[in-house]
Amino acid sequence: MGAIYLESGLEAVNKIAIDLLERNYDDISLDSLFRDYKTTLQELTQARFGITPEYNVIASRGPDHKKEFELAVVIEGKEYARASGKSKKIAQQEAAQMALELLKKEK
C-alpha cells in the first residue's frame, strides 16, 4: 500500500483498500467493529458512580478444551447482569452490554 501511495497517490490506495475489504467481508458494520461494551460501561460507571465495574466468575463448566464461563457484572455491590460465553472476555462483553441497557433505563 505504501508503494502504491507513493506511485499513484491516496485515491488509488483508497480504491484498492475498499475493494479488498468488500471482497473479503460480506457485511461490515461500524457499530459492531467499534462496540466495546466493557469500555463503555467502565466510562459510564466512572462518570456516574466514581468506580469501575467488577466482573466476577460465577461458574465455569465443561472440559478445558470446551469451557464455558458464567460471569456477573457488579457495580457498587449490586449485580446488574450475568452472561455466559466460550471465554471470559465474551461473557464480560455480554454482561457489560446488558448492564449498560439497565443503567440507561435507570437514568
Image (cartoon, rainbow, N blue to C red):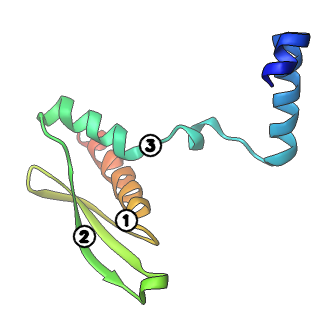
The answer for how far apart the CA atoms under marks 3 and 2 are is 20 Å
Q: Position of residue 11 (x, y in %)?
A: 85, 13
Instruction: Give the CA distance from mark 1 to mark 2.
Output: 8 Å
Image label count: 3
To which residue does mark 2 refer? 57
Q: Secondary structure at mark 1?
A: helix
Residue at 58% of width from left, 44% of height from top? 32
From the image, tell me which residue sits under label 3.
Answer: 36
Q: Position of residue 7 (x, y in %)?
A: 90, 12
Lateral position of residue 44 relative to residue 30, left or right:
left
Of 106 and 36, the residue lying toward us: 36
Residue 88, which numbered label? 1
Q: Are marks 1 and 2 in contact (CB under 8 Å)?
A: yes
**Rendered view: 7 above or below 35:** above
Q: Nearer the viewer, residue 44 or 89?
A: 89
- Give the secondary structure at mark 3: loop
Tell me which amino acid carries mark 2: Val
Is residue 107 visible to the viewer in this orientation of the structure?
Answer: no
Amino acid identity at mark 1? Lys
Is disc 1 in contact with disc 3, using a CB cutoff of under 8 Å?
no
Viewport quadrant of the C terminus: top left
The residue depicted at 37 percent of the width and 65 percent of the height is: 88
